[in-house]
Image: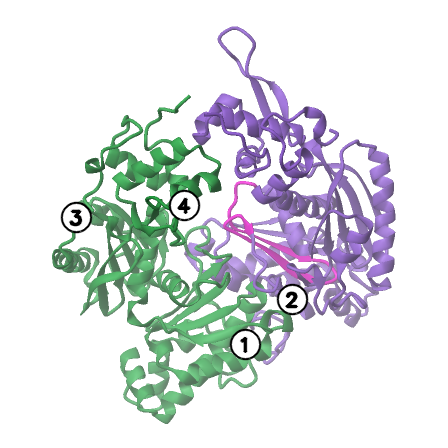
Chain colours: A green, B purple
Amino acid sequence: MREIRPAGGPGVGELFQLFRDARSWTRSELAEQTGLSRNTVAARVDALLAAGLLAPVGSASSSGGRPPAQLGMNPRAGLVLAIDLGATHATVAVTDLSASVLTSQTIDLSIDDGPERVLDAVFDIGERLLAVVASPSPLLGVGIGLPGPVEYSTGRPVNPPIMPGWDGFDVPGYVGRRFPVTVLVDNDVNILALGEHALSWPAVDDLIFVKVATGIGAGIILGRELQRGAQGGAGDIGHVQVPYSRDSPRPPGDESILGDLASGAAIARLLRARGVDAANSRDVIALMRANHPDALEIARQAGREIGEVLAAIVNTLNPSVIVLGGSVGRASEPMLAGIREVVYRRSITLATQQLQIVPSNAGSQAGVLGAAMLVVQQLFTPQSVTSIVTAATGRTAPVSVPAAAGLRY
Amino acid sequence: MREIRPAGGPGVGELFQLFRDARSWTRSELAEQTGLSRNTVAARVDALLAAGLLAPVGSASSSGGRPPAQLGMNPRAGLVLAIDLGATHATVAVTDLSASVLTSQTIDLSIDDGPERVLDAVFDIGERLLAVVASPSPLLGVGIGLPGPVEYSTGRPVNPPIMPGWDGFDVPGYVGRRFPVTVLVDNDVNILALGEHALSWPAVDDLIFVKVATGIGAGIILGRELQRGAQGGAGDIGHVQVPYSRDSPRPPGDESILGDLASGAAIARLLRARGVDAANSRDVIALMRANHPDALEIARQAGREIGEVLAAIVNTLNPSVIVLGGSVGRASEPMLAGIREVVYRRSITLATQQLQIVPSNAGSQAGVLGAAMLVVQQLFTPQSVTSIVTAATGRTAPVSVPAAAGLRY
């Protein structure tokens, strides 16, 4: 008996998962792989084609006759607005559903102008960029990275130290009034970790991304999943007290936390204490690039302090890769050397025997890439795909859906 | 057209996943849930019934006529041998496939007798216990917890500090010669964490289990998954250097690691330094139970040192629950108080606002429960279920499989 089911019913979202690692399939291969009947596969593929989520990608070899169609995920089925907010700048990008940046713009701004002014400004840029892309595909989601702790389940900042006016602000609600689509908000370090992992370390299961900029924090990927913790507060290594080291210039009884010893702001303060003119992390970067000896020495010591905290994390989590990023971290070879020195000295054999400690190479686009990945991962869950297909084809559509009922791409 | 497929083909393992959270289903509900045809569901259910992995569990209400059969996971389809090895004792249990202990025995032994003597001794007990259970169901797996670091992928101990003769020993290979079934080996703290999570905190996503016995270590569950890290070395908090605290009796320049300050062995040493007769962690437990004032004071301070390390972990991982277990941890209310004092003082608001720090209540069976869970989780993956069904029913079996071809239960 032939099944007559809503095209968006159970199964269409699960079938789509097979396309997520970018491989292509014929309908027969899908039937073989899933054990579903050819009729069922055909109906679900039709629905995914109609919704634009799948598209033909060339043709398989065949023994004569018309070759069977190869189908693949269609990255042009929708657009994502990806926003990476820092303390003093923002990058806004429009990406496709493979998180590839179609167009982007970076501007200076001040996060302490408060949420409405900052978000309105980046939304204006977002709309201009969407107009530039001029794609017929719909905007399906907005991803935002913020420079402070975020309760991931609600998208609200929680006691963010450098974001006055943002504490508890309903970011997704505010975004939703301008862009009524899926909105996901996370702290910028998690987003950088996602971007770095996707770009440079896709085969690695366990990766720690350390961001050193004005502040300091970590994004933690374990078992290939970003770990946010119970309230989204994971990765706040800036508040971890640094274990004492005999080699440190700190007095033995010091109880400093890492953010007060090794962030860009802390390095600027330590430079000023030596009479060097350094107002902020931007000045620190410039001094390091100019090989200023005090800047190099303080950055190396900051690396050692970071290493003391990372050594504890290495013994606790046994990652394969530690990536040093952020504007200060990326600019500082001595900081990386200081981290390596202490981590390899302090950590046990098993945890360090294959550990790599490397600089970030994702560059300034890693933030928007990660913000886009956050949205795409959410859009491509089975439930979300089922909703997209149902919306595009109608709940009570028959098995065979006219292609015109789908999204526009 | 009716599908004729091998009963153990794609899909049977996936269908079984629906039964893993202990709920029961009728065949119609399964067809509705999965979108598979009734014929396909019937064939896969028949194969799972024939292999003994499913069994009828009562009947659903129905509007007249014979009620449709409710099917559920059959925990009696196989047996697991679960072994919890400590430094000075072992618990051996036979469980069913829900990890329920059918029979168990605890003996004294010395882990430094080396792998062959120790394993031979526990295997003898295991065989006696299997004879006691006298079940017609086959043994499907052996799970073993060891008191030291284990490379999980190979099941070999790696530089275990208190297990002379075990370094690099091929535990699964040795077990497999006596019991030719699935063998999984992990360190005892991971196994205790799995047991504690399953027994007491099944709804919690992020849990840290801290074991304080002769040594000290942690089992880390994040996103509901046990995190072993890249080489299985995660959780080794005993090697983490303890941050300095003004309240500590340690001198300011001290660089001690946690295992040297707060383990059962360390507490015994600190008691001996005060002239108290305490040879090992067993003596420490006896003194704490007798409310010996030095034992209580040193245990509280040990709790504070553990708290200094856990505060860093809380800021880094933001767990919901920290469980204190192990023979010394379970016996020590002052240690728990010391941990709470420091963690709540040192950690940031977001990470501690809903954090619970509690004593283990899984008791002495938690180790064998966790060892059994390790095996059951592996046996019930889709690939493994498919193999079990294929082995039980034959690769080329028709859709309808005679019940007699299944396992014996």
Identify the chain of the residue marked 2, using the numbered disc in the image.
B
**Quarter assignment of residue B9:** top right
Residue B139, image x and y in percent?
Answer: 76, 40
Which of the numbered marks, if any, corresponds to residue A343?
Answer: 1
The residue indicated by pointer 3 is A178
Which of the numbered marks, if any, corresponds to residue A405?
Answer: none
Q: The residue under label 4 is which amino acid type?
A: Gln
Q: The residue under label 1 is which amino acid type?
A: Val
Mark yes or no: residue A304 visible: no
10 Å neighbourhood of mark 4: few (<14), some, or many (≥20)? some
CA gap between label 3 and label 4 equals: 30 Å
The residue indicated by pointer 4 is A17
Q: Is residue A341 left or right of residue A87?
A: right
Taking the spot 51% from the left edge, 11% from the top edge, the residue there is B62
Compared to A281, does B13 lie above or below? above
Labels 3 and 4: the sequence-earlier one: 4
Identify the chain of the residue marked 4, using the numbered disc in the image.
A
Residue range in magenta is B202-225
Q: Secondary structure at mark 4?
A: helix
Identify the chain of the residue marked 3, using the numbered disc in the image.
A
> Is residue B157 in the magenta section?
no
